[in-house]
């Protein structure tokens, strides 16, 4: 498996019980309060690193790879882009107390570019292979030889995802604070949107997982027999990704189920207590943005005729076709998470 091969209803939820009163909006407020600090940290670290790379040719905050929408760009080109984005981010953070709407627009625009373009498929690679990479650091498992040249850019991609989303959240919070308008979703419309989004956010990774499970069982589903032979033990790494994707499906279903609102009663300490909204929304939005960004990389490869950069041959459609649906999966996850938050807020 290569870094490019990475991954991740139900009845209407019942009315939130009385225990939901234990869900304080303070959790969401804490997330919003942390966002400007994370946004500022991204701007300082990445902009500083980019400037040093341009001036002294030191380590770059972004390394060229076909697994990115910016795959045809050089480190210097993207470093210049990061400097510009960092300047916009700093301007937005400074202007926020004086002109919330202008600052919010700057932060949201720069954050979307950072989260969706700078962060690429390597962020999803790190999340999908995370357990195997950690075991590999101590010489265990199929990733027993972890290459720092692969690990460091993957960690940087995760940093861009976090920093970009922090910028977006900071900007959106500023814009919302300057306006008296609410989310515009009633609990009923939010529940309908959440159910529809969850169907999509489960179907896409479930199909991806099906192909990898078949390979692990020696079934050449969507690929040539030769591909499985070439893959070797890599098919078991694919099995790990499939299991991670299925686990994500289960958690996504929780957005429209009672157990996604109230912890199971048999759980110690937490049993019967309301699930903090941020505990569901933050992972949904984060993973959704990472998946969307990763999917864009596969679309770039398909559009420029470089799909052979993926594992296998063009004829091995199951090695790359499911990934073309990842942008749809990412959007669905974000919509599901935001709709879940709107519904929970409306039911309090």
Image (cartoon, rainbow, N blue to C red):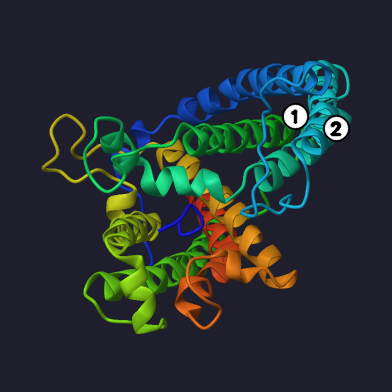
Residue 61 appears anywhere in the view: yes
In this view of the protein, which residue sits in the foreground, 60 or 339?
60
On residue 117, the disc is none
In this view of the protein, which residue sits in the foreground, 200 or 227?
227
Question: Is residue 21 shown left or right of residue 283?
Answer: left
Q: Categorize mark 2 by other alpha carbons within 10 Å: few (<14), some (14-19), many (20+).
A: many
Question: Is residue 265 shown left or right of residue 300?
Answer: left
Q: CB of mark 1 within 8 Å of CB of mark 2?
A: yes
Q: Secondary structure at mark 2?
A: helix
Percent coordinates x, y for residue 82 in the rendering: 78, 31
Q: Secondary structure at mark 1?
A: helix
Q: Categorize mark 1 by other alpha carbons within 10 Å: few (<14), some (14-19), many (20+).
A: many
Q: Kindly identify which residue carries mark 2.
A: 101
Image quadrant where one finds the N terminus? bottom left
Question: Is residue 99 shown left or right of residue 219?
Answer: right
Using the image, determine if residue 100 lies above or below residue 251: above
Percent coordinates x, y for residue 312 in the rendering: 48, 72
On residue 174, the disc is 1
In this view of the protein, which residue sits in the foreground, 62 or 83?
62
Q: CA distance from mark 1 to mark 2?
A: 7 Å
Residue 186 appears anywhere in the view: no
Using the image, determine if residue 97 lies above or below residue 78: above
Identified at 63% across, 30% down, the residue is 163
Using the image, determine if residue 121 lies above or below residue 176: below
**In which image quadrant can residue 274 be found?**
top left
């Amino acid at each position: 498996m290569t870094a490019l091969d990475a991954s991740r209803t139900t009845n209407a939820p019942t009315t939130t019980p009385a225990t939901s009163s234990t869900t304080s909006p303070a959790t969401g407020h804490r997330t919003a309060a942390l966002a400007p600090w994370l946004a500022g940290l991204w701007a300082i670290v990445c902009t500083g690193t980019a400037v040093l790379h341009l001036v002294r040719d030191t380590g770059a905050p972004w390394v060229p790879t076909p697994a990115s929408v910016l795959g045809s760009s050089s480190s210097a080109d993207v470093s210049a882009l990061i400097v510009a984005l960092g300047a916009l981010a700093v301007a937005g953070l400074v202007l926020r107390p004086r002109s919330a709407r202008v600052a919010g627009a700057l932060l949201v625009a720069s954050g979307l570019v950072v989260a969706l373009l700078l962060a690429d498929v390597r962020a999803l690679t790190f999340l999908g292979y995370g357990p195997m990479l950690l075991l590999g650091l101590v010489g265990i498992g199929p990733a027993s030889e972890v290459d720092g040249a692969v690990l460091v850019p993957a960690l940087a991609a995760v940093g861009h995802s976090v920093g970009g989303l922090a910028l977006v959240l900071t900007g959106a919070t500023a814009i919302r604070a300057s306006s008296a308008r609410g989310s515009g979703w009633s609990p009923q419309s939010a529940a309908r949107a959440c159910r529809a989004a969850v169907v999509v956010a489960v179907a896409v990774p479930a199909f991806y997982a099906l192909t990898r499970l078949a390979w692990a069982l020696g079934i050449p589903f969507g690929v040539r027999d030769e591909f499985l032979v070439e893959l070797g033990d890599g098919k078991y790494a694919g099995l790990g990704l499939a299991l991670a994707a299925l686990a994500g499906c289960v958690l996504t279903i929780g957005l429209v189920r009672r157990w996604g609102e109230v912890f199971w009663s048999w759980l110690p300490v937490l049993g019967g207590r309301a699930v903090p909204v941020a505990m569901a929304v933050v992972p949904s939005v984060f993973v959704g943005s990472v998946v969307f960004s990763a999917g864009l990389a596969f679309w770039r490869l398909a559009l420029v005729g470089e799909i052979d950069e993926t594992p296998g041959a063009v004829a091995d459609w199951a090695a790359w076709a499911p990934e073309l649906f990842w942008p749809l999966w990412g959007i669905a996850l974000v919509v599901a998470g935001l709709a879940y938050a709107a519904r929970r807020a409306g039911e309090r």
